[in-house]
Image: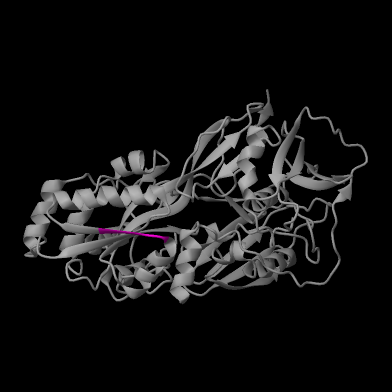
Amino acid sequence: MKKAASLILILSLIFTVFCSCDGNDGPTADPAVVSNLDNTKEGILKLAYSKADMLDPFTATMNANIQIMGLVYDGLFKLNKAYEPVPVIAKNGMVSSTSVNVNLGDAVFSDGSPVTARDVVYSFEKAKLSPTYLEKLRNFSGANVAAANMVVFTLNTPDPYAVSCLTFPVVKEGSTGNLPVGSGRYIPEISGETTYLVVNKNKPNFNPAVKTIMLVPVRDSSSLESSLEIGNTGFHYNDLSSGVYSRINAKTVDMGINNLVYLAFNSASEIFSDPLLRQAVGFAINRKEITATAFQGHARETYSPFNPDWYALASKDLILSTDIQKSLTLIEESGIDTTEKEISLLVNKENQFKLETARFIRDYLVNLGFNVNLKEYELQYYTEALELGSYDMYIGEVRLSPNMDLSVLLSGGALSFGINPESPVCTRYTQFLSGGCELMDFVNTFNEDLPFIPLCYRNAAVSYSNEMQVEANCCDGDVFYDIDTWSFR
């Protein structure tokens, strides 16, 4: 049942939308009361939020609220489009085996007080208890103050890219409740019943055209899209986790996210226990067709298990062309008659993107001579079938942490359905994390063993009102990454 819960958690893409409780006692930092705020509509960006939800960076449960928290709070680092950590509160960070040393810069909170190592450790301990950041910090066992401006984090296992996970919000030690003190680009203020965000004057090098943001309450997440269309708000983010894309009357652009969609094999399958057969399937799949048609263009094909946008792959040529003749040769080399036995392909039929993907893959395999039974199940029965192992292949999805941690799929991780934890690829991955081999050594072993076939990384859809002038250089780590370049028409 543990695996079932983990699968539903990730397949539904709700790592960041569970609630948690904050039992901390201490001084509460309430937003300041506005004395002379311009309440005219002109020049004010309106963002939807849930008034029933907490406006606390560690307990907010609605995606819209969590995204807004990124405007009020900075992390030690932020991630750019290549998932590369960029120092914000931190001056630098260095990983050595299971230790991560972070030196702080000269950041100050919105009240003018300096951000110290004690504040960072305090925030880390709260983030470790928050489902929003729990998965990112899963490999972090603790944090200690080494000096007033230095924090040492301890890892459970080595991870050369651990710094990418240090994006949790840093708040002032002891400030709790709604909107504790942060050091972000905006600070909260209240006028009557309305909460606004105004530019943080203690934030250096930040002088945006968007000086004021009004938070507009909506009933639930289903109201976000309509709120933008009728002009009540100026921005909407849709992670497309439903598997459906609907056009709306607004400027909409795709934004790459760290959600891997893959075809996994059951290592106990009579046919797919042979890596040659797994490789044969890999060469038969046309990823470009799947991303363009099954995902309606809202995905990027990938030829390794890692995000193709990841900075660590910048100089690597990983593209593998579809090669039917190569597939047929591998099938012949395996000595297995693929026409003798029916193979099952399991998919969650509630997601149209994945259902169409499964149908493409079925057709590819039928053309190779496989006899394919496509099992189109609702999520509940899909999950039960995975637990029972009643499949030869399945379509899965996982949102990876920004350090591209694959342990959730390998080495007995929460989603390692059908994958032998003692396989060569699992051993190689452990070696890679500990510095025993290079990144491409792992990728080459992965392609030979091929416990699952990476298909694509999904996109989200980001929409802006027609009154906004936006270049849309947002990124997965912060949908408001480029808000300093936004302006009003």
Residue at 59% x, 69% y is 153
Secondary structure predominantly adopted by residues drawn in magenta: strand
Q: Quadrant of residue 436?
A: bottom left
Magenta residues span 374-378
Q: How is the image coloured?
A: one colour
Residue 106 part of the magenta segment: no
Front position in the image: 187 or 228 = 228
Image location (x, y in percent) of residue 152 = 62, 69
Q: Is residue 343 left or right of residue 329?
A: right
x and y percent of residue 367 in the render? 15, 49
User: Residue at (75%, 52%) from the top-left corner?
Assistant: 51
Report the residue that reaches farthest toward the right: 35
Tell me if residue 263 comes above or below residue 324 in the rendering: below
Say whether residue 211 is left or right of residue 383: right
Q: Is residue 284 visible?
A: no
Q: Residue 260 placed where, x, y %?
A: 41, 54
Number of marks in the rendered image? 0
Quadrant that contains the C terminus = top right
Residue 397: quadrant of the picture: bottom left
- Considering every residue shown, the one lying at the far top of the view is 489
Residue 389 in the image: above or below residue 219: below
What residue is at 69 percent from the left and 62 percent from the top?
A: 58
Q: Nearer the viewer, residue 233 or 101?
A: 233
Residue 13 rendering spot, x and y as whole percentages: 51, 57
Compare residues 476 and 392 and report the one nearer the observer: 392
- Can residue 361 be seen? yes
Does residue 316 appear to the left or right of 96 in the view shown?
Answer: left
